[in-house]
Amino acid sequence: MIESITLILTVILIVMIILLGVLCILYFKSKSNKSKKKETISTSEIADQKASKNYSVGSVFDFMEFDKIEDNMIISKNGNKFVMVVECQGINYDLMSEVEKNAVEEGFIQFLNTLRHPIQIYTQTRTINLESSIQTYREKVKEIEDKLEKQKRDYEQMSNSDRYTQEQLNAAFYELTKTTNLYEYGKDIIYTTEKMSLNKNVLNQKYYIVIPYYPEELGETNMDKQEIKNLAFSELYTRAQSIVRTLSACGVIGRALDSNQLVDLLYVAYNRDDAEIYGIDKAIQAGYTELYSTAPDVIDKKMQALNNKIEEEAFKKASQKVNEAKSEKEKELESRENRLDDLIDRFATSIIEQNKSAIGEEIADSAIQKIQKETATRKRRGRPKKDTEKGGTEDEQKEGTAKRTRITETA
């Protein structure tokens, strides 16, 4: 009875332990599922927050240095700054004489002494765009071509008619020849200019003096914006003309830029890469009024540069490996050429040994010995000659000994 009760209690205890283990497993499993659900919910909330984030789109004028161009002035800082620009034509100082250099220096000193307001000197390097010149040449050459065709028709009619004297025909032929030469000369100019336009290294530097004006210089006034703008134009124009006059004393020619020229200046400054391809004249003709362009993304530029570099390095490596493979084959060919006689001797020896029964052992052995003797002789001839203690090589000493023997015998 006691043993049966003990067995039943043992079984119950084992079952309870198993149930406890199952409950623990289920508890930890449900806990891990809850934590995963929380992580998923937090990740989705973060994604929703990112998706719902608003990006404000600002105007390009918020980060540009000017507001507009009006009345030959660059207006910036919401009408609190006015700028006028004077373009200066450079002089070749190095080719001047000492007297001319002194005059230029004195004129520049006078220019600096007359300044009563701040200025800024700006240099802009441009690639020379010859497209407008080429178009002008083409129009002129087209006019000459039309004139030439008319003169050809007139001369042909005069030649077929009996109403003109020989002197008139000669004069007409002279004019026809002159126009023909002029037409050919114009075509040559267009061809030469087009070839020059392909060279992107033809550069031109332009020099500018930037003259600013601030309405704060007036102090506290009750003037409206239009009155301030008119006063700023008057003051800037006076300053620009004063600078042009003082610069003329040192041989520098200057002129104040108008609105279109200011647009060209800013267009090149903000579109330096594309200004040579699409100039301001084309932009104005096309109806564009913006002075900026959307540049490619920096990452795209870096990716393009990286792809170009990978392609270039790949071509270099491929060329290098091809050359290495060629050199290895050439070395192998040279080695085979140097071992040509040895290979022939080995192959001949193999043939004789395979056919001993047909040739006869004695003849075969004799032939093999002859081949081996030729091989040994060839190897001795191919070895470098060694210097002996008395000087000279072994062959030279042998030859000298033989000569001395012959001389002794003759004596």
Image (tube, rainbow, N blue to C red):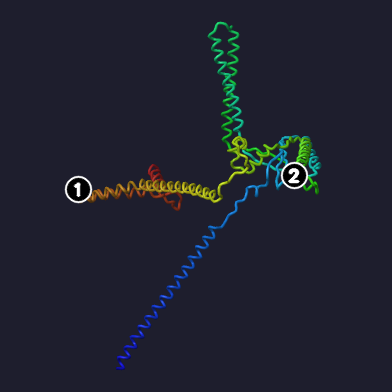
Q: Is residue 122 above or below residue 193?
A: below
Is 197 left, or right, of 210 in this rendering? left
Is 13 left, or right, of 151 in this rendering? left
Q: Is residue 148 above or below residue 406?
A: above
Quarter-wise, where is residue 233 in the image?
top right
Can you give x and y, in whole percent of width and height, for residue 162 in the image?
55, 6
Q: Nearer the viewer, residue 196 or 364?
A: 196
Can you give x and y, in whole percent of width and height, for residue 1 in the image?
29, 93
Disc 1 crowd, CA 10 A, few/some/many (<14, 14-19, 20+): few
Quarter-wise, where is residue 144 in the image?
top right
Q: Disc 1 to disc 2, how far (Cα)?
A: 124 Å
Please give the name of the residue rendered at 39% of the width and 81% of the height, measured from the top-left corner: 20
Can you give x and y, in whole percent of width and height, for residue 147 in the image?
58, 19
Furthest toward the bottom, the residue is 2
Q: Disc 1 on helix, strand or loop?
A: helix
Q: Which residue is mark 1?
A: 359
Disc 2 crowd, CA 10 A, few/some/many (<14, 14-19, 20+): few
> Which amino acid type corresponds to the residue marked 1 in the rendered image?
Ile
> Which amino acid type corresponds to the residue marked 2 in the rendered image?
Lys
Q: Disc 2 on helix, strand or loop?
A: helix
Q: Nearer the viewer, residue 167 or 219?
A: 219
Please give the name of the residue rendered at 80% of the width and 44% of the height, measured from the top-left corner: 116
Of the residues under marks 1 and 2, which one precedes in the sequence? 2
Q: Nearer the viewer, residue 310 or 48?
A: 48
Question: Total number of numbered labels?
Answer: 2
Can you give x and y, in whole percent of width and height, for residue 234 in the image?
77, 39
Q: Which residue is mark 2?
A: 225
Please give the name of the residue rendered at 58% of the width and 13% of the height, measured from the top-left corner: 173
